């Protein structure tokens, strides 16, 4: 079956119940491979996300001579080669659909003694890479691109130099790419951001023994520091849990518990947004997996109300907006999201994809340059196109819980990039979902 042929059909009704564990965090899984590969010694990873995005990162490092064993489905043993031990890959490194892989690796590979060629699928090849190329060039990197887009050809370095960079966008991918190049630069590399983006890189580099200065909107490190292998336990991904959080919140009588979810404060915007909308959400069993806070999240269904979501809530819930728009569609009154123009440069233009899908289902929605206006109310059924975007596909699947007729969602194969097993887990939790 070609990837665009997989579709979901979801029957309305039903409610979510039970205790679920969604797969491992995508951001942390990518970084575990990258940092484990650059470390000295054996890094072990438990709870690794076996989504296609992270498997692309894994294959890329294997192609650069890193031995990675997988003793169990979600366990890895990464035999680190040290900061200067990567080998020249024989073929282009195919990063599939993954923006995180491409932008972080652009930074890391800018410091190598060999040329590397980074390629991706049609969606990744449309996404902006100048945002990472520009600061890396200031550091002395030499990168050829297709007018600021993939494929990227990263040429061998000539002694990178540290920079102090004021990023125009809050982006953990930009920040992390620069910090990784900074490991290969002389002096102190600093990144300032307009809002605090997710800080998994800073936390995990520390776990690998690197000295990192970090506070909201700022991160810095001195070049030349080596990484020491460590053991990583990956929390469940709050961005995957978010689909079930909203699924439970929009259906009165639902009650679910999501286990072991990463609740790093740079990622918990979805909890703040849903609580603003009136949802009943509790964190239980709060603890840590290494440097990352984790909790079980209990959500009970009830009525939601429309809210205004401004820029201050955007960075910490950037990947959750597709499902937030679904919550808005079932809330009482109007929801307005602003300051979220970054949504336009994700796997699809998530403002347009969601707005078109909602309207196709009879919801009054209006796209704004930097967000959306959604009037809560009824949702008919019908057919929507996910545009190959995993988060759009899963969002409309969850919406069917409250739709009046079945929803058919086209082009769903990319759900495997971040959430392998989504349909089976959702079915077990009570969603009437069928794959065809
Ligand atoms: O650093 C990361 O792991 C990620 C950062 C975010 O992207 P931006 O840095 O472009 O906001 C997010 O959308 C992506 O899913 C994962
Ligand atoms: C934007 C996303 O990922 P990436 O940028 O890594 O493709 C996402 O998973 O929603």
Image (cartoon, rainbow, N blue to C red):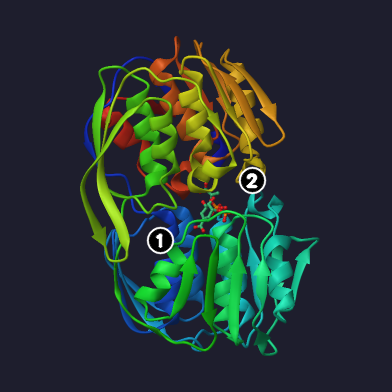
Q: Identify the element where label 2 is drawn.
A: helix
Left or right of 209: which side holds 334? right
| Residue 195 image position (x, y, % from top left) | 57, 53
Residue plotted at (52% across, 89% down)? 224
Q: Residue at x 74, y 68 (%)?
A: 134
Tell me if residue 340 comes above or below residue 198 in the rendering.
Answer: above
Placement of the C terminus among the 4 image quadrants:
top left
Relative image position of residue 423 (x, y in whole percent): 36, 34
Between residues 350 and 193, which one lies in front from this camera angle?
A: 193
Image x and y of residue 325, in percent: 52, 28
Residue tagged by mark 1? 28
Q: Residues within 10 Å of mark 2 (few under 14, many from 20)?
A: some
Q: Quadrant of residue 232?
A: bottom left
Q: Residue at x 31, y 44 (%)?
A: 22
Q: Quadrant of residue 178?
A: bottom right
CB at disc 2 and ligand 1 closer than 8 Å? yes
| Mark drawn on residue 342 | 2
Do the residues under discs 1 and 2 have CB atoms within 8 angstroms?
no
Binning the other alpha carbons within 10 Å of mark 1 as few (below 14), some (14 to 19) or many (20 upward) gives: many
Q: Does 246 appear above or below 196?
A: above
Q: Which mark is residue 75?
A: none
Which image quarter: residue 228? bottom left
């Amino acid at each position: 079956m070609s990837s665009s042929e997989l579709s979901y059909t979801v029957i309305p009704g039903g409610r979510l119940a039970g205790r679920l564990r969604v797969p491992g965090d995508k951001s942390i899984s990518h970084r575990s491979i990258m940092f484990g590969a650059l470390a000295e010694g054996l890094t072990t990873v438990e709870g690794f996300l076996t989504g296609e995005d992270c498997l692309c990162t894994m294959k890329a490092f294997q192609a650069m001579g890193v031995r990675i064993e997988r003793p169990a489905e979600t366990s890895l043993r990464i035999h680190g080669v040290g900061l200067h031990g990567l080998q020249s890959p024989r073929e282009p490194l195919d990063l599939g659909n993954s923006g995180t892989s491409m932008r972080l690796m652009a930074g890391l590979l800018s410091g190598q003694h060999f040329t590397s060629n980074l390629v991706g699928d049609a969606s990744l090849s449309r996404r902006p890479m100048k945002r990472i190329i520009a600061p890396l060039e200031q550091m002395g990197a030499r990168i050829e691109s297709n007018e600021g887009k993939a494929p990227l050809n990263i040429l061998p370095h000539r002694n990178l130099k540290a920079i102090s960079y004021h990023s125009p966008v809050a982006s953990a991918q930009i920040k992390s790419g620069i910090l990784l190049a900074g490991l290969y630069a002389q002096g102190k590399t600093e990144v300032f951001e307009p809002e605090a983006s997710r800080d998994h890189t800073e936390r995990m580099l520390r776990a690998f023994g690197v000295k990192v200065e970090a506070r909201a909107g700022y991160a810095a490190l001195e070049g030349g520091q080596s990484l020491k292998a460590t053991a990583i336990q990956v929390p469940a991904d709050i961005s995957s849990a978010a689909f079930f959080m909203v699924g439970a919140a929009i259906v009165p009588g639902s009650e679910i518990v999501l286990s072991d979810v990463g609740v790093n404060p740079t990622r918990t915007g979805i909890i703040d947004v849903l609580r603003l909308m009136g949802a009943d959400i509790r964190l239980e069993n709060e603890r840590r997996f290494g440097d990352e806070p984790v909790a079980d999240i209990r959500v009970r269904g009830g009525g939601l109300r429309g809210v205004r979501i401004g820029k201050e809530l955007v960075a910490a819930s950037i990947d959750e907006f597709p499902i937030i728009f679904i919550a808005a569609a079932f809330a009482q009154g109007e929801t307005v999201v602003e300051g979220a123009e970054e949504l336009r440069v994700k796997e699809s233009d998530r403002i347009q994809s969601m707005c078109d899908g909602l309207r196709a289902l009879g919801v009054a929605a209006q796209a704004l340059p930097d967000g959306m206006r959604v009037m809560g109310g009824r949702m008919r059924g019908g057919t929507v196109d996910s545009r190959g975007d995993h988060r759009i596909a899963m969002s409309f699947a969850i919406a069917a819980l409250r739709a009046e007729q079945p929803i058919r969602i086209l082009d769903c194969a990319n759900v495997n990039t971040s959430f392998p097993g989504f349909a089976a887990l959702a079915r077990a939790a009570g969603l009437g979902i069928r794959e065809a």
